[in-house]
Each structure stands twice: as structure tokens, then as C-alpha cells.
Amino acid sequence: MVLGPTFAQESAQKPAEPVERTAKEKAAAPEKDASKPELPFQIQLLETHVRFEINGDSRKEVHTIVKINNVLGAHQFARLTFDYNRAFQQVEIPLVRVSHANGGTSELLPSAVTDALNPAVEKFPAYQDVRVQSVRILGLQEGDTIEYRVISTTTKHPLAPDFWLEHTFDHSGQVLEEIYELDFPASRPVPSACTRSTPESQPAPPPDRPCR
């Protein structure tokens, strides 16, 4: 309420000043657009392969490559966590590699992986099989790239031999390339459904081939 009248008075005394100010603001506009904050991290590759057996057992392997763009992204990926149920699942983390911006690389040893009770069920003794495997990555910096693989194996699931699976593809631009592959037994037809937002990139494969 105070700035409006003040600006009007100054405009009456110096009519050329608003024109100059507008020109300066227009000239500075591209600089503001060019300096828009980037994403904290960019997932360059998200590759998932899921294989189901005739008895309902499954194996899921996820391969991910992430580029760290700033300090916030480094904080978000300082610890990788993977939930699982110990009663019928196992989790392996065979690869965690960091390619540093200065050209060096480092790989985490298996001893860096910790297994603990999921904090969400700490007060519920009946759910002690709900666990979390985590990997702490020290020294992440802007420009570093993380590559990791995670393998989840499910055996004797309570719903076996039936199974149910749902996946949502990224539409935000956070993921540059995403590959999702399903491998079913040829002798077991599996119904599938896609939302209208999912593009039809290729025809359905033969029954003895993986579904991508």
C-alpha cells in the first residue's frame, strides 16, 4: 500500500526512469530463465527386470544410474534403502559404484550394507520380519554419478502361485531413460492392463518372449 503512491510520485518527477527500468528488466529476464534451479539429481537410467516362475516365485533386478547435480541431491542419495520382508524375500546389493566428478571411481564393499528392522514396525513385535537393507555413501559431491544394482528374490510368497504387480512410469522428467521388462512362464497367460497415459511403443510379444 505504501509502495504504490511512492512510485507514482517518482514517475511524475522522472518520466523516463520507468522506461529505462522496464528495458533493464526485459534484458535481465533471459538471465533469470537461464539461472533456473536444476533438479537435485537426474536418473539417467532406470532398468528393471522381473521374472516370475510357474510356482509364483520371482526375481527382480533393478539397475540404476544417477547423476548428482547439487548438494541437495548428494544428501538425498547419501543413504540407499531397500525394504523387504524377511519371511519370504531376500535382498542383494551386488554393485554400488561412485564415479566422482574429478575422474576417480570407488566401489562399496559388501560390509557397507546394513540390515535392520524397519522403523515403522519397531513397536509391533508381530512384524519383525519387515526389514530394511541400507547402504551409506560417504563423500558424495556435485557432479558425481552413482550406479547400483539391487536383486530381490521372493520364494514361497503367501499368495503363491498367484501374484500381483503394479508399476508407474515416471512422467516428471526426473528419469531420462526407463526400461521395464516382465518375464512370465510361457505356459501361464497373464492378463495385463495399461492406463491411457502409457504409450504403445511396440506390439505385444509372443507368449514365449518377455513382456517389455
Image (cartoon, rainbow, N blue to C red):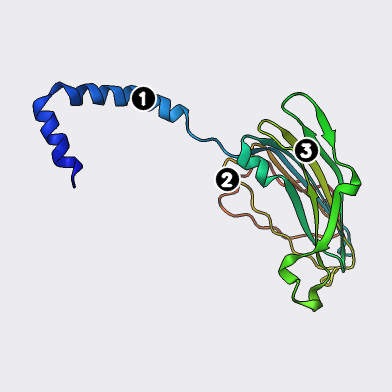
Residue 20 visible at all = yes
What residue did someone put label 1 on? Answer: 28
| In the image: residue 26, left or right of residue 167 | left
Secondary structure state at the residue bearing disc 3 = strand
Q: Amino acid at mark 3?
A: Glu
Picture coordinates of residue 176 (x, y %)?
64, 36
Q: Nearer the viewer, residue 56 or 125?
A: 125
Q: Identify the disc placed on residue 147.
A: 3
Badge 2: residue crowd in 10 Å (few <14, some 14–19, many ≥20) = few
The Cα atoms of the two marked residues, 2 and 1, are separated by: 31 Å
The Cα atoms of the two marked residues, 2 and 3, are separated by: 22 Å
Q: Nearer the viewer, residue 94 or 18?
A: 18
Badge 1: residue crowd in 10 Å (few <14, some 14–19, many ≥20) = few
State the residue at coordinates (77%, 55%). Answer: 82
Picture coordinates of residue 133 (x, y %)?
81, 56
Residue 59 visible at all = no
Secondary structure state at the residue bearing disc 2 = loop
State the residue at coordinates (75%, 49%). Answer: 80
Q: Give the total number of marks visible in the rendering.
A: 3
Q: Amino acid at mark 1?
A: Ala
The answer to whether the residue labelled 2 contacts the one labelled 3, judged by CB atoms less than 8 Å apart, is no
